[in-house]
Image (spheres, rainbow, N blue to C red):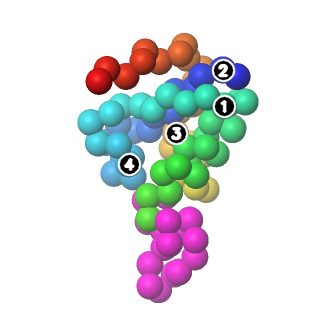
Amino acid sequence: MPWYAVSPRDPADPRWPLPGRERIVLKAEGPEDARARFEEAYPSEPYGSPAVPVPNAGLGSFRGDPDALNVEETGEPPAPKE
């Protein structure tokens, strides 16, 4: 399974859940699977608001905005340092 780098198209996008990290690298079957895995792992406000209590549709969610994320194949990331 290849590795994919997911990053916001606009580096200043306030929805990006990882301040200080310009991208996240993960394994996926393809670009759409990488996007889906990212959206599942980082739903931002997963339960909406009191006015709109719909799961995974809160403010800050990248769901429904496919142009907001860049997904590109990349190499295996280095092992984390302890």
Q: Which residue is mark 4?
A: 17
Mark-to-mark CA distance, 2 and 1: 6 Å
Question: Farthest front residue?
Answer: 82
Q: Which residue is mark 1?
A: 28
The secondary structure type at the circle numbered 4 is: loop
Mark 3 or 4: in front is 4
Give the mark nearer the N terminus: 3 vs 1. Answer: 1
* Residues at marks 2 and 1 touching, judged by CB atoms closer than 8 Å: yes
Give amino acid for label 3: Leu
Mark 3 or 1: in front is 1
Q: Is residue 61 above or below residue 48?
A: above
Give the mark nearer the N terminus: 2 vs 1. Answer: 2
Mark-to-mark CA distance, 1 and 4: 20 Å
Residue at image location 44% in from the left, 38% down from the top: 8
Q: Alpha-carbon neighbours of circle 4 within 10 Å: few (<14), some, or many (≥20)?
A: some
The mark found on residue 69 in the picture is: 3
* Residues at marks 4 and 2 touching, judged by CB atoms closer than 8 Å: no
Give the mark nearer the N terminus: 3 vs 2. Answer: 2
Q: Is residue 11 left or right of residue 44?
A: left
Instruction: Assign the C terminus to one quadrant of the image.
Output: top left
Q: Which residues are magenta?
A: 46-61
Mark 1 or 4: in front is 1
Give the mark nearer the N terminus: 1 vs 4. Answer: 4
Q: Is residue 16 above or below residue 31?
A: below
Residue at image location 38% in from the left, 48% down from the top: 17
Q: Give the image location of residue 33, x and y in percent.
A: 69, 38
Q: Which residue is mark 2?
A: 2
Give amino acid for label 4: Pro
Give amino acid for label 2: Pro
